[in-house]
Image (cartoon, coloured by chain):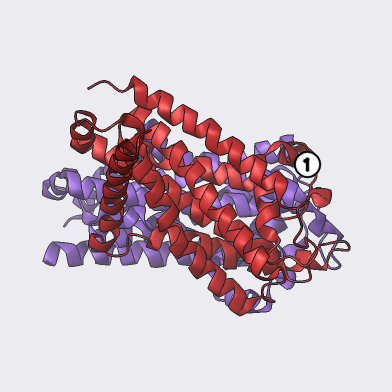
Amino acid sequence: MSTRGAAYAGGVGFALWRRSLLELARVRGGLLPTTIAPLIFLLGSLGQFGRLDQLVGFPTTSYIAWLMPLSCLQAAGFAGGATGANLARDIEAGWFDRLLSSPAPRPLLILGPVMAAMTRCLVPVTVILIVGLLIGPGLTGGLFGLVMLYLAAVSFSIVASLWGITLALRAGSQQVGPLIQNGVFVAVFLSTAYTPLPFLKGWLAIAAPYNPVTYVLQMGRQATVSGIEPSWAHTWPGLVALAGMIIFFGLLALRQLRRVDL
Amino acid sequence: MTELALERDVSTQGRVVVALAERALRVQLRRAQFLLPSFLLPLLLLAVIASGTSAAQQLPGFPSTGSYVGFVVSGTIMQGTLLAGLMAGIAIAGDIEGGFFDRLLSAPIHRVSIVLGRVLGTALIGVAQAILFLFVAWLIGADYTGGVGGILLTIMLAALSASAAAGLGATIALRTGSLSLMQNLFPFVFVLLFTAPAFFPRALLNPVLETVSVVNPLSYVVEGMRAALFDLPGLGSVGWGFVAGIGSVVLTCSLAVWAMRSRLRS
């Protein structure tokens, strides 16, 4: 791509990203659902299952340290999924047809929402982190762990937004909203959400190792779980899992975009 | 009003309640966006919790109920009924925004019947949920030592829980009349669920939550279900479960009727 082409692409992507963020300024409390739901899950699960940290061999003595990265990922997933729901609304309102008829290359039309998801997820993730750190034992993984947690969350928001965009393009209706969020919910919870792999029983013990989110969680948990010390061994499986999911859902979204007719 | 007229009125209103309940059931069972949260989501969480947190049985003080899934299924029923109540509220808000509610109000029917119709429809959904969830839990290992009697008592408690949740959903929907607000209440259902000993015994909850759970009527309902399913009084009291359930239904339905009258006045 020439310098001029790259500048043009950047300009279109930036404009669509800015439009997505402007919505947040216009709709008061627009980020509340994506922040409150994971926060309630965090505090509720801590209250219900908090004693699990007393199990022999549990990798931390603070259950909130185990849950916090899960809630961050959940919040990032919901924030990413919300951009898909917003796209569905744009399709219903006819705005997306106007974008399709513009001379902008089609892949750029999904770049804006993906960039918006990455930005939007920072708010709920930071709120959850602050609440968790106020209650919990702190950042046992230091700065490296914190960077890994944010990297995991922001990357997962990209995955969720690509999933949401694919469904929105396919359905073309806002009714697809619950399906987007339920997909995120399933992906996050069919993993080591509540306990580490050795403590899982039955079908989840078989399914969780095949779920890439398990490894993304491990990467994020380097920040708060003392038993998962910051290391390359705890990082690369998460990076591979994220790259794989981004490529897979990115291709799905682009394929769906190519199928959209004016 | 003469005694005969009153009787006719009661019988007419009874038919109205049944007709509105049938409509509520049809609407909820026909639309996937209503079915997904109230049937599939609790089943998914049951599967995840049963497999993901079953190591909790190794904790000292965890009651012995055979399989772990048998212990947590009461929480799943509670979750399902709460979500069914929310869906009832969403459906009412949809009726208000869509104009169907105004047509109901202009019909010669008692205001209370409108609320009771929705509550009855949701109670029947609660019964369906309880049967389904208990069956699925049985398939994956739950053993209900309380027998058929215990299962029937649990289904009755589920119906009460769903009715109370529908009353609450109706109250909020009638007060606000906003579909989007009702849809955003989804996370708050989990506040009610998590402040009761839904998935863990009360003695093993976080101390703050243990204190809060005392004032949550759902605590007594979910513990009543467990006591009935396993015929173990140490898990809770069936009697207190019914007292809390009936009390919640009366309170929330009264609030819903009051909300409707306030709406009509304004």
Residue drawn at x 72%, y 36% is: A210
Against B193, residue A200 (above or below) is above
Residue drawn at x 51%, y 63% is: A125
Q: Chain B is drawn in which colour?
A: purple
In the image, is B123 to the left or to the right of A245? left
Residue A52 sits in quarter: bottom right
Instruction: Say which of B219 and B229 sits in front.
Output: B219
What percent of the width, then of the height, locates residue A54?
82, 68
For mark 1, does the 10 Å Cα neighbourhood hold few (<14), some (14 to 19), or many (20 or more) residues?
Answer: some
- Seen as rendered, the residue at the extreme right is A56
What percent of the width, then of the height, locates residue A195?
75, 55
State whether residue B137 appears in this view: yes
What percent of the width, then of the height, locates residue A168?
36, 34
Name the residue carrying label 1: A205
Tell me the chain of label 1: A
Total residue callouts: 1
Query: The C terminus of chain B lies in which quarter of the figure?
Result: bottom left
Against A82, residue A30 (above or below) is below
The chain that appears red in the image is A
Query: The N terminus of chain B lies in which quarter of the figure?
Result: bottom left
In the image, is B126 to the left or to the right of A216? left
Residue drawn at x 84%, y 63% is: A55
In the image, is B244 to the left or to the right of B151? left
In the image, is B155 to the left or to the right of B24? right
Against B159, residue B238 (above or below) is below
Callout 1 amino acid: Ala
